[in-house]
Structures are given as C-alpha cells and as structure tokens.
Amino acid sequence: MSRPFMPKRLGGTAGLTGLAYVTTFKDSSRSTGALALPGGLLAGDIVIICDRRSFNSSQNQTDPPSTYSSLYRVYNSGRTACYSFSYRILDGTETEIPAYSGAGFLGSRRNCFVYRPAGLLSGVAVLGAGAERTDGNPSAITVPCSASASFTIAVAQYGCDGSGGAINPRTFTGATPDAESTIQVYNYAKAAGQAAPASNVTVDMDDEGNGNQIVGFYIELT
C-alpha cells in the first residue's frame, strides 16, 4: 500500500510572477554517493528530486537528503524499493545533492528537475497526489492541476521491478512535458503559470510485469 506524506502549505504574501524550466540531471547508475549539481544554476532555483531507493530488505526510508524538504513519499510494505520526492530552493552555495545513507541501503536512482521562479516565492505545497503499485495493470492517475490558480509543476513517475527499465507505453497526456528523465524509472515534469488555469494531466502505463509503480502529483508555488 502506498503511504504518502503531505506537507503543510506555507504562509506568506504571494509575489511569484513567473516560472521557467531550466534543466534536468540524474545519476548515471545506481549510486550511494552525492550527485553533483549542473553548472549555471542560480540562487532561488528550485531543484526537485525523484529518488527511487533500493535496499537489501523491506525498508520505509523515505526521508529527504539533508538540506532538502519532503514533497511526497511512497512506501510499499514488504518491498525492497521506496520512492522519495523532495525539493530545495538553492541559496547559491550548493555544489551537490548530499548522499543518502540508511540501514540496508544499496543506492539511489535520482531523476532531478530544475525550475526558476521569478518574483517572491512564499509557499510550496503538494496537491492532487496519487500512487499505485500492482503486479497487474495500474490505473491511470489524473493530476488536477486546473484546480490551482497559481503556478504549478506536474510530476509523474513510472517504474517496474521486472522491466529492466523499459516502460512502453507510458503516457503524460493533457500537456506537453518540459522534460523526461530516466534511470530505470521514468519521470516527467511540466510547469504552468497563472495566466490561465493549467491543464489537468493524466499519467498511465501498461502492465510491464511484477511490481508496476505509477505516481502523479502537482506542486503548487505561490
């Protein structure tokens, strides 16, 4: 069963005037070390980590790396993999994402996205989240971005224990994603502004074998 973590909405006076996709980066293989940030990032940029963690036994270790904050967590009882989604607003001094460590930890597969807000960012919240893990065909998840009047980032993840990384078809419909990143699991991300309501996004995949995992949610920025 998926066990999500939902943070509280932060307070403050809204002052965000824009949001732009910057880049994507990832681990080159399963890693137990830090992950270097790409060049050209600026103070105020938002780094979003989509981390699939592997363990040598069933674990519920979904905490974010140090200096990062949780967005969403998925843990499936009895499984040796869990999923941790987190973010950080850069202060301009960072050079890497810190390594994670824990009991029985074998390594992370991190897909990361960077967005650049314009104006004053005062709030970050996760809304419309859904996840399913099944040995059959997962149900499609609708991410209701149109419910927000603010800036949003839709995030999707697709994975399968038995596929060796290839998941086809996998769909992200309703909007064209800014980027795709993959290292065994696939992630998509798409930002939208407040000039008009963002389109809802539907994420779906077929049955790729045992341990199919699908996740969809959106991040609301104010």
Image (tube, rainbow, N blue to C red):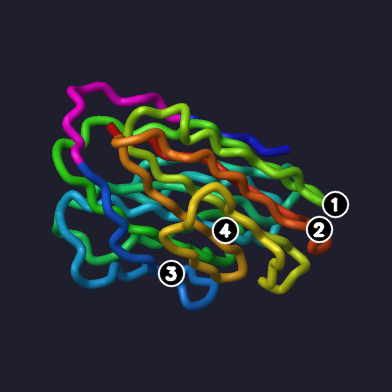
Taking the spot 67% from the left edge, 38% from the top edge, the residue there is 2
Left/right placement of residue 36 relative to residue 175 reads left
Q: Secondary structure at mark 3?
A: strand
Are the residues flagged by discs 3 and 2 in contact, CB closer than 8 Å? no
Residue 121 colored magenta?
no
Residue 53's label in the rendered image is 4
Identify the amino acid type marked 4. Arg
Q: Secondary structure at mark 2?
A: loop
Residue 207's label in the rendered image is 2
Going from the N terminus, do you reach mark 4 or mark 3 first? 3
Magenta residues span 7-17
Are the residues flagged by discs 4 and 2 in contact, CB closer than 8 Å? no
The answer to which image quadrant residue 178 occupies is bottom left
Identify the amino acid type marked 1. Gly
Residue hosting label 1: 136
Are the residues flagged by discs 1 and 2 in contact, CB closer than 8 Å? yes
Identify the amino acid type marked 3. Lys
Going from the N terminus, do you reach mark 4 or mark 2 first? 4
Q: Secondary structure at mark 1?
A: loop
Residue lying furthest front:
196
**Marks 1/2: CA–CA distance:** 6 Å
The percent coordinates of residue 4 (x first, y second) are 58, 35
**Depth-wise, is mark 3 or mark 1 nearer the camera?**
1
Callout 2: 10 Å neighbours few (<14), some, many (20+)?
some
The answer to which image quadrant residue 38 occupies is bottom left
